[in-house]
Image (cartoon, rainbow, N blue to C red):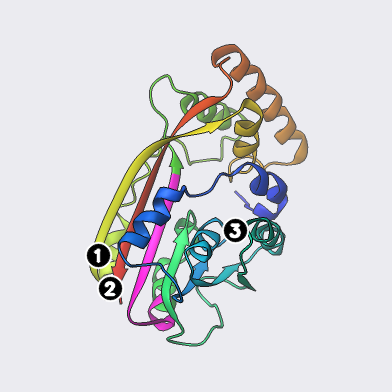
Amino acid sequence: MSIDFGKTAQDYKTHRQGFPPAFFDKLAEAGIIGAGKRALDVGTGTGTVGRGMALAGCKVTGLDISNELIEQAQILDDEAGVDVNYVIASAEDTGLPSASFDIFTAGQCWHWFNHQRALDEARRLLVNDGTLVIAYLDWIPLAGNVVELTEKLMQAHNPNWTGANGTGLYAHYLKDIAEAWFRDIETHSFDLNLIYTHEAWRGRVRASAGIGASLPPDQIQAFDRDHADQLARHFPQNPLEVHHRVWWIVARK
């Protein structure tokens, strides 16, 4: 399945809510982010993690392969009143100077990377005792909830999509991180409900790998019409409470 998030950049900017303030509060409480710290956010997309770190006082560089997503990130940064430096490059080959960052973050994107090469690049870029953070904010399908309905519909419209039935937990990454000679490895998580109107939830789902980033326009429109109809039939309450899980790994170089 060919994925291009640039195709869905507008929905991505408008409807993906991004990591909640509580996530950044926990990073700040742990001393990971804070004033003057130099942070690189790879796979930055529309900048949700980088912007949150910038609001906490970090000096942030955001990196992505999609110019379209970076353009949307810059609009959101202007609205938030923060200044983030952006670079178009891959997480495995950033072209940035060695030992130039205190923090290396990857939010909602680690599965797209070659893990060994990305970890090698993280070690190269981090100062000694620098911090690696790999984080996810995932919708969680539960029996009878709106996510379950949405995922079944996504599978019907895109049989090549394999992202259904996730738990929001990525324990299999821990082995790679330990073998890359990171230490003090920790995992953290919390659950929350994000509030979406029907329109916003449809936009959020369009801005996903299984729909807007992979299907042709006519199939995206067909899915969206079907999604709107199913939401109106089975979840008429508006707005919706959508179950999510925030999960992250912290490790030290």
In magenta, the rendered stretch is 122-137
Q: Position of residue 78 (x, y in %)?
A: 69, 60
Residue drawn at 52 percent across, 32 percent down:
195
Q: Earlier in the sequence, mark 2 or mark 3?
A: 3
- Foreground residue, 7 or 242? 242
Measured in 3D between alpha carbons, the distance from the residue under mark 2 to the one under mark 3, in whole angstroms, is 25 Å
Residue drawn at 36 percent across, 39 percent down:
191
Callout count = 3
User: In the rendered image, which residue does mark 3 sit on?
Assistant: 45
Give amino acid for label 3.
Gly
Measured in 3D between alpha carbons, the distance from the residue under mark 1 to the one under mark 2, in whole angstroms, is 7 Å
Give amino acid for label 1.
Ile
Q: Position of residue 153 (x, y in %)?
A: 57, 26
Asked if 88 appears above or below 49 in the picture, the reply is below
Asked if 132 appears above or below 203 in the picture, the reply is below
- Foreground residue, 240 or 25? 25
Q: Which disc, if any, is residue 185?
A: 1
Measured in 3D between alpha carbons, the distance from the residue under mark 3 to the one under mark 1, in whole angstroms, is 25 Å
Q: Position of residue 54 (x, y in %)?
A: 53, 66
